[in-house]
Image (tube, rainbow, N blue to C red):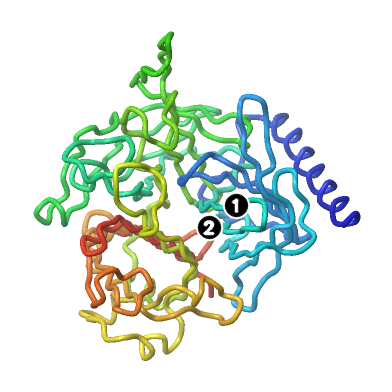
Amino acid sequence: MHSQAAGTLSWLGLAAYFSVILTGCNGNGSSKTIASQTTNAPQLYLAAGVGNLQTYLIDHSADQFIVTSYSTNGGTVQDSGNISQLSSGLFDLDITYFPGEFLSGPPLTASWEVEIPGQAALAELEATDAVQTSTSFAPLVPIQSCPSITTSESFQFVTIPKRLNTLSSVNGAGWNPQLETAYGSADVVTNGSAVQFSNISQHTLPAVNGGAPGTPVNPASGSTTGACSPTFFGETISVPSAVTIVNPGSSNPESISPSATIGIGPGGFLLEDSGSSKGSGNGSGTPYENVLGAGYGAIGIVVPSSALTTSNVTAAQYQGILYGAASGSTASLSSSGFRLIGSFGYPNLETACPALPAPSDSTIIYGGEFANNDPSANSYGNCDLAIDLGTQDSSNDGLYPAATVYVSASFPYNSIGTSYSFPAVAVAGQIDEKYAIFLIGMDTAGSQPWGIYLLQSN
């Protein structure tokens, strides 16, 4: 117990060291945003999109990680522990420290990470012991330097949804696919620490508006300027909003301007947090649109330089997160929501799939979740889902606005007991020569939005 505690404290010291280094960085970081970067050095990532803003410090040379959340009083370590790589390439995150508690033995855990080191990652922490529980899921973007984009680059994104808003109006506690942003695009260019977002385009989910994309009821401005600078979270981009949020629950109401926090990785991976408003709790405050997405923010990728060959995209192998956001009027997950580690595109996987429609082999990719959410027992997961990307948009390379997700009766969160499908939108491209697919869909049978986030693993 003593040696374990000492090791963890030493690891906490490493995090403090990185905090000092980051706050001393030049906000005009020289990293070329659309450039390849390979490094074995410890990586600091911004964890955004679902829940509170956090950082992940991941050191593969030491096989350790630490997760930190922040307030006005500074950082608090939420989890730390050891990392081991499975034969499939997935990383097992073994938590050994909760706040104030060093664990004498591993907790009941299902914590995993998919990573293109130094470029992009997807993490899921699910751990419980006799005292407390740690539960979080988030995409991770490296933020050890500010982006440098001297020539404007176009990005495409999809919203990371909150649970379904079942009301007929916009509600900050949930996401409404008929009224709020599902996907979009923006041009980005930097000038020193200034980051200019222009030609911001946002669209609702086409299939819920008669098959055509709609305009959100509360669209963001077509252009806005942010600033990249050292923060608690590393070198991140902050974008003030023109909207003012008033906290009505205070005896002395206070107005603040909500803001979005954005990170752009060296390979063109983009991640936006959901912003902040006083008194909003878990997103249940006054609704407003962020710079890019709605719901919990946005996840995106630089637009490819030419149209993708869809058959090449679907021929690759992927690992990632399957995210069901549940339904209702509050932001917390219910028993109907899910967060699962999964895989797609592994050889001969289609032959193991339950009967699912396959309208076109060149645009469909099969996969599913790992049994018991545990990838340590197998190099690839079940086959009870399929993604049909459909036709690539003729005017937007890498955009698939009419994708379809097929759900078999054997999928563990199939609530109706028979196979069905639902409409989705996907964006695809490459991060450091690896394909990535980010998807948002509306599962009408399961009454919840889905997100599927995949990084190529082969």
Q: Is residue 156 visible?
A: no
Compared across the picture, whether 147 is left or right of 348 comes to: right
Residue furthest to the front:
130
Residue 322 percent across, percent down from the top left = 42, 63
Quarter of the image for residue 312 reads bottom left
Considering only vertical position in the picture, is 31 above or below 219?
below
For marks 1 and 2, the one nearer the N-term is 2
Quarter of the image for residue 236 reads top right
Residue bearing the label numbered 2 = 122
SS assignment at label 2: strand
SS assignment at label 1: strand
> Any mark on residue 308, and which?
none
Considering only vertical position in the picture, is 354 above or below 401?
below
Taking the spot 47% from the left edge, 70% from the top edge, the residue there is 342
Considering only vertical position in the picture, is 372 above or below 400?
below
Compared across the picture, whether 156 is left or right of 80 comes to: left
Compared across the picture, whether 329 is left or right of 28 comes to: left
Taking the spot 67% from the left edge, 50% from the top edge, the residue there is 79
Q: CA distance from mark 1 to mark 2?
A: 16 Å
At label 2, the amino acid type is Leu
User: Is 14 in front, or is 96?
Assistant: 96
User: Is 82 in front, or is 313?
Assistant: 82
Q: Is residue 140 visible?
A: yes
> Any mark on residue 134, and which?
1
At label 1, the amino acid type is Ser
